[in-house]
Every structure is written in structure tokens, then in C-alpha cells.
Image (spheres, rainbow, N blue to C red):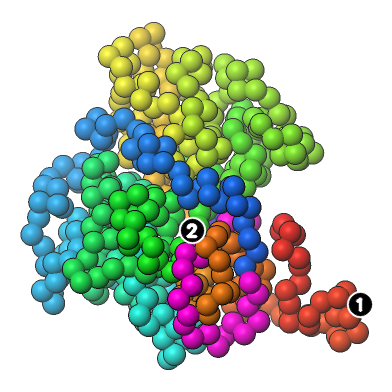
Amino acid sequence: MSTPDAIAADEAEASNKFSFMAAVSKTPKKQIQFADDMQEFSKFPTKTGRRSLSRSISQSSTDSYSSVASYTDSSDDEMSPRDKQQTTTKGSSDFCVKNIKQAEFGRREIEIAEQEMTALISLRKRAQGEKPLAGAKIVGCTHITAQTGVLIETLCALGAQCRWSACNIYSTQNEVAAALAETGVAVFAWKGESEDDFWWCIDRSVNGDSWQPNMILDDGGDLTHWVYKKYPNVYKKIRGIVEESVTGVHRLKRSTDVMFGGKQVVVCGYGEVGKGCCAALKALGAVVHVTEIDPICALQACMEGFRVVKLNEVIRQVDVVITCTGNKNVVMREHLDRMKNGCIVCNMGHSNTEIDVASLRTPELTWERIRSQVDHVIWPDGKRVVLLAEGRLLNLSCSTIPTFVLSITATTEALALIELYNAPEGRYKQDVYLLPKKMDEYVASLHLPSFDAHLTELTDDQAKYLGLNKNGPFKPNYYRY
């Protein structure tokens, strides 16, 4: 049962949902019928978009310390899935998961998730007759959970063929991966992958026999960058890319059993993710400090009651350090050396570049595994720093995201893929686009029945007075909820 604190964190997380899509080619397809009022997507600022999509592999998952020194659960101390010969009940071997025999268990988890993802199931029922994704070959790289399973099976029901890998080496639910493989989805993922496994799985998802992707669904850009760099000819034939990310601070609470009331916390970065973290921490009773480079974000933090500081000013006194910048070298060894005993360090950004974990892999420091994804790093004088998920993205490495929150994200992703795949020639140029308000409003409307909510409708006179279409969109593209 969720506590009020966890619910507050979930709400903060939902408000920080951020998705965009990239139009890559302009092959014409039929227009889908349920999005008649779909506006052209608002362009994402070009420099930012290109910077996100062209992130080098050296600034992604491969920046961490060699996986030889990484820890995995005791259940993983057996033969690598890559060395196993496994087949589904139908005889397919086009997958690589931990244990295909867990498929039945994973199927039950997917069925439970479907109960909370009614909007996505509604979309599946409305559109599966016309198969708007018929001919779409979608390669995906996301967290592989029961909720993602509902999304993947929805895409398949709408006509797509899917191949999938995991965007995080710790977040895969093995039984769900097995269930998807059993249904015929080519899944290459398991919990506790090494760095080499991570890129091998991405490569296998791209390379299928007599199969070439024409759409990408990505979480973090690793797949997009891999295809762009290694398979330029494949990349040129991609019609569109959908990218998303979410976050939530309550995973930190669940991983450490720490009470946050009165704790001193510094959040590095007050962007989309940092704002959600700070709001959740404030609700938990923590004393929150913020570091920022942007004066506007810094002013927003100040007006929310947070003290804006430099990391060096508070590093000796804080109990928790959370990075949310998307940058690199934010928390360095010099900061780690100055932290007090028991300080918790973790990362909410997608890439594992923010905390200098490699500097902690030295002979004078001792690593002690406390529980899954929780390590003590012990200094010679006995000081201990608690490191979560080895500096990787915390949210799904250490806990789960509420299914309803993921329903909103997954439904949006499905619509974005349908729109890109079916867009007529000339609608989108080769650029990066924010999702339109109209699409977000449609997704929200699909979820309102879960709350028995009833919208008020504008009269013709009211709509004219406001200069709006009665059916939306109701806010300009620059409006931030």
C-alpha cells in the first residue's frame, strides 16, 4: 500500500514526464482516423535536440567502471544467458533472456499491469481493427517491466513487429522478458548485464534475420546513437524516433529505509527531474539545497523555498547527494572524500556520468555489498559512503514506477509512433519535435474515466472569447503545466 509520501513523489514524477520524437524520413502512409485534429508537433529547440541525440557513447553506459567489478544478485551467479540454448514452446530461439521458463510468471505480471493501464488497453481496442502500425518494424530500448510489456503487446496488436533490449542493466524484470519472448517478441535483456552484454543486446535487437527496423522507441538515446554510428544505412531508412524519460525520488527511500524528515539533501540540477525530486523531498520533510548553473532555474528554486548553493559549500554537512543534471563530472572524488560518514549518493540522470564512480575503484577503498544495488564504499579511516545502483539511473534500478504513471507515458509513446509512421509526406522535416498539446490532451482524456471525472465543455461564446477551438488544444505550446 502506498504511503502519502510515496504518492506525493509519484505525482511529482508524473508532472515531470517528458517525451519528444524525431522525424527522420518522409515516407507517406495513411492518416489514422482517431487523431483528426492532430497538430504538427512543436519543434524542439534544434541545438538541444541534436545535443541529446548525438550524445557520444563515451558519455553513456560505457563510461562506468568495468563490469568485471560490478555486483549482481546472487541469483545471477550462473551461466550467462548468452551461453544458453533456449527455445520457446513454439520453437523460436530469436531472443536472449535469463530463463524462458519464467514466462508464465511474467504473463501474470503483465496481466496485473493491464488493469492499471486502462487507457492503453482502450487505445488498443479502438485502433487494432485498422492496424495503424501494419508494416512498422519497431526496435526498442527501454526498461523492460510489466508495464513496458503492455506497451509492446499493444504495438504488436496494432500491427507492428517489435524487437527489444533494455536501457538499464539492472532494471529488467526477467520473468517479463521471458513472457514477451514466449509470445514471439525478440527480447534481448536480463537483470545484471555487463557493459559488453548491454551493447550486445542492443546490437542483436537491431540485427534480425530478414528484418530491418523502420521505427525506434528509445529511453536515453543509446539505441539511437548505436544505430546512427554503427548502421548508417539502417538509420537512413528510419521513419521516426520516439524518446522518453521519467524519474522519481521515492526509490531512494525504498532502497535505504532512511527517514527523510529533517535530513539535509543537496539536489544537483533544478530542471525537469530536479524539480520533481525537490518537490518529493520537501513533502518528505527534508531540508533541501539546490545547485544550479542556470539563473532562471536557480530563481525558480529560490522562490520554491530552496537554498541555492555550490556543492563545495554544503558537501561536508549533507546526508544525501542526488545528481539530476544530465552532465558529467558533477560529483568528483574530491567531493566524495569530503562527505560525512553515512552520506547517501545517487544519480537520477539517465547516464552514469554524473558521479565519478571509477575514482572509487582504488586499492585503498573497500566495497561492501549491503543489498541489491546498495553498496558501502569504505575509506581507510572507517568512513562509509552509501552508493546506490553504482551511480546509474536510480529509479528502476532500485524499485518500480507506479503502473498508472507509466500508462500515461506508454499511451503517449504509442500515439507518437502511430503519428510518425502514418504521417503524410511533408508533414515533418528531418528534425526533433515536442509532442503537441492535442496529443497530451487526448492521452489525459483516456485516463479520466479511471477517476469518474467529468470535463466541463466550453460554450461557443466562451470559446470565441478565449480564441480557442472548443475541442482543444486548450493551452499554447509554450505553456508548461
Query: What number of labels is visible?
Result: 2
Is residue 369 within the magenta segment?
no
Residue 447 visible: no
Q: Position of residue 264 (x, y in %)?
A: 61, 27
Q: Nearer the viewer, residue 1 or 352?
A: 352
Q: Is residue 476 above or below residue 316?
A: below
Q: Nearer the viewer, residue 412 or 3?
A: 412
Q: Is residue 458 above or below residue 3?
A: below
Question: Label 1 sits on what residue type?
Answer: Tyr
At x 47%, y 56%, the residue is: 401
Q: Position of residue 217 (x, y in %)?
A: 42, 62
In-image side of 64 versus 445 (left or right): left
Label placed on residue 465: 1
Residue 288 visible: yes
Q: Which residues are magenta?
A: 11-40
Q: Nearer the viewer, residue 431 or 138?
A: 431
